[in-house]
Image (cartoon, grey):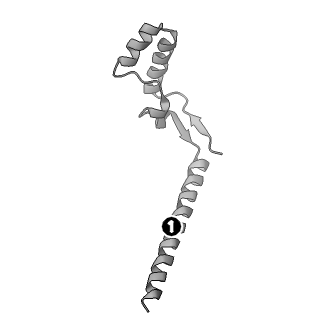
């Protein structure tokens, strides 16, 4: 299972976001609505352009994913070669 590691210390952008998130959770509904309408309001690491700076995979997990991707690539190429061989055989 992949494990995401949180950077320590947090990147500067994430530190600002954490502060903004704390203000948001402490705010009343009207203030929350006002904050949500601001252009720079974002407290969702999943949709933030800095999410990859805050959370990263261990080198072992990165290599595991690269290996799996390479295996899938080999399987795709083998299917392509088989299809080519089949078409070539039908031409003889």
Q: Is residue 92 left or right of residue 70?
A: left
| Residue 80: percent from left, percent from top | 47, 73
When asked about the image quadrant of residue 13, the answer is top left
| Identity of the residue furthest to the front in this view | 90
Q: Residue at x 47, y 29 (%)?
A: 11
Quadrant that contains the N terminus: top right
Up the image or down, 69 lies above or below 41; here it is below
Up the image or down, 24 lies above or below 71; here it is above
Which residue does the numbered mark 1 point to in the structure image? Answer: 76
* Residue in front for this viewpoint, 44 or 17: 44
Up the image or down, 73 lies above or below 18; here it is below
Within 10 angstroms of label 1, few (less than 14), some, or many (20 or more) residues?
A: few
| Identity of the residue furthest to the left in this view | 39
| Residue 69: percent from left, percent from top | 53, 58
Q: Residue at x 42, y 9 (%)?
A: 31
When asked about the image quadrant of residue 34, the answer is top left
| Identity of the residue furthest to the bottom in this view | 92
- Tally of marks: 1
Quadrant that contains the C terminus: bottom left
| Residue 58: percent from left, percent from top | 59, 44
Q: Residue at x 48, y 7 (%)?
A: 28
Q: Residue at x 36, y 18 (%)?
A: 37
* Residue in front for this viewpoint, 31 or 14: 31
Q: Is residue 37 left or right of residue 66?
A: left
| Residue 62: percent from left, percent from top | 56, 49
* Residue in front for this viewpoint, 88 or 74: 88
Up the image or down, 87 lies above or below 7; here it is below
SS for callout 1? helix
């Amino acid at each position: 299972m992949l494990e995401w590691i949180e950077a320590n210390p947090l990147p500067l952008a994430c530190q600002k976001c954490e502060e903004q998130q704390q203000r948001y959770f402490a705010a009343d509904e009207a203030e929350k609505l006002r904050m949500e309408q601001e252009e720079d309001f974002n407290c969702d690491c999943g949709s933030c352009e800095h999410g990859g700076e805050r959370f990263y995979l261990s080198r072992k997990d990165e290599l595991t994913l690269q290996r799996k991707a390479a295996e899938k690539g080999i399987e795709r190429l083998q299917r392509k070669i088989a299809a080519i061989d089949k078409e070539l055989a039908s031409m003889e």
